Amino acid sequence: MKRTNFTVGLVLVASLGFYSCDKIENPIPATVGDLDWSLSPFEDSASYTWPIWTTNLNSVKNVLIEDFTGHTCVGCPDAAIEAANIEAANPGRVIVASIHANATSQYQIPIPGDTVFTTDFRTEAGNEYATTFECDLNPLGTTNRKLGIYPAITQNIPEPVLQQLTSWGTSTASLLGEDLDVNIQVQYNYFPNENGLFVHTETDFINAKSGTYNVVVYLVRDTVIAPQKLPGGLEEEEYHHHNVLSANINGTWGEEIVSGSVVSGEK
């Protein structure tokens, strides 16, 4: 959350089990907020199965850990382990998104002429987040984009959200104990022949709120096998990169659903 420059983001992570060593080229349509019927086996909406929403009975807040990482960052595997351990200790309530980004792309750019570090995990959204949050090195991360501790003195943004990995566990535990304000449900239809994905969301405000709220939908690859530099000058060519952010389905900052006030129970 950063006041002034951008809105509160309600992040949905649509995690698909793509298991690949390659970057997905153009994984999403350019159309935002609409359905591109060329990505479905139907010519129009007449035969499409639209979602039916049931009452969302969830009563607890979940946590998104955004791990800003890089494939040539030797300290990043330790951060990935920390994030994965927190996720495993809180099944279903903690989600990790590995964002390969840095304000200068210092650890993300494929090495010119190198035959090992050829994968480019960078995304337009990830690059913008790194620049906005002044992510000047890796690893750093966010927990629900709440107030961070690094580098609070040097950052010019109103609320620095970046945290060192040693803070992720404590911050996550605190956030998990907070009251829930918003419930989000997601349904999707995937068409393998067309390689098309339609994502639908429903946002249910538990408590009355005021402000501007956006829903952001991430496309995350569960596992990507690609090289990674390790401490001590070592390299692992078949490193398992976990929950890699591959694209934002509805734009870097998502789509606005509320601007002003919303009452309890409003969807």
Image (cartoon, grey):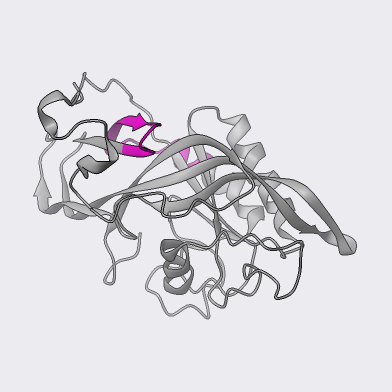
Taking the spot 43% from the left edge, 80% from the top edge, the residue there is 156
Q: Viewed as shown, does residue 130 lie left or right of 236?
A: left
Work out which quarter of the rendered image holds the C terminus and state it: top left
Picture residue at 26% right of the left edge, 71% below the top: 4
Q: Is residue 212 above or below residue 94?
A: below
Q: Position of residue 54 (x, y in %)?
A: 21, 18
Is 202 placed left or right of 22 in the picture? Answer: left
Residue positioned 52% across, 42% down in the render: 221
Q: Quadrant of residue 58?
A: top left
| Residue 163 occupies quadrant | bottom right
Place of residue 51 in the rendered image (x, y in percent of width and height, measured from the top left): 21, 25
Residue 265 shows in this picture: no
Rendered-image quadrant of the N terminus: bottom left
Above or below, 163 relative to 245 = below
Q: Is residue 225 left or right of residue 197?
A: right
**Percent x, y for residue 107?**
66, 69
Q: How many marks?
A: 0
Query: What segment is highlighted magenta in the picture?
Result: 173-197
Q: Position of residue 190 (x, y in %)?
A: 35, 31
- Can residue 178 be found in the magenta stretch? yes
Can residue 116 be spotted in the picture? yes
Query: Which image quadrant is residue 177 in?
Result: top left
Residue drawn where x is 74% and y is 52% of the image: 78
Instruction: Judge whether residue 100 is colored magenta.
Output: no
